[in-house]
Amino acid sequence: MSINSYKDLIAWKKAVELVIEIYRLSNNFPKTEIYGLVSQIRRASVSIPANIAEGSKRSSIKEYKYFLRISYGSGTEVETFIEIIKRLSFGISANFNKSEELLAKIMKMLNSLLKKL
């Protein structure tokens, strides 16, 4: 299978899936966090596929790698926010297993893609 578009990349597809999962989970967070952790984790998760897409359309491999590194950094932000949210608990029983599994796969794929470029 040839890669004609960033939409063909499994890393991008998984990252979009992660965004949907993060939005679903964060709908149950306290309303007091709408401009705090909810906003932060949503923006960081959206940044992952957005930067994969933007980087793929840049004119050089160097620029593409730069945007993949930004995606990776956003992934570490999401990972940190999940840990903070789990520790705060907010009295909710959110299950982050799917998010954490997706994120781990995405991070491995980004590492692999960076090495191949």
Image (tube, rainbow, N blue to C red):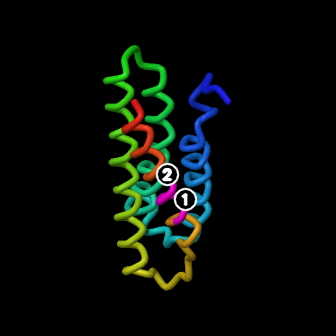
Q: Which mark is residue 84?
A: none
| Residue drawn at 38 percent across, 80 percent down | 88
Q: Position of residue 95 (x, y in %)?
A: 57, 76
Q: Which residue is mark 2?
A: 106
Q: Which residue is mark 1?
A: 102
- Image mark count: 2
Q: In terms of secondary structure, where does tag 2 sit?
A: helix
Which residue in the rendered view is the most extreme toward the top? 59
Q: Are marks 2 and 1 in contact (CB under 8 Å)?
A: yes
Q: Position of residue 53 (x, y in %)?
A: 50, 31
| Mark 2 → mark 1, Cα distance in angstroms | 6 Å
Q: Nearer the viewer, residue 55 or 90?
A: 55
Rendered position, 69 above or below 22:
above
| Residue drawn at 44 percent across, 48 percent down | 43
Q: In the rendered structure, which segment of residues is drawn in magenta?
A: 101-105
Question: Is 20 on the left-hand or right-hand side of 30?
Answer: right
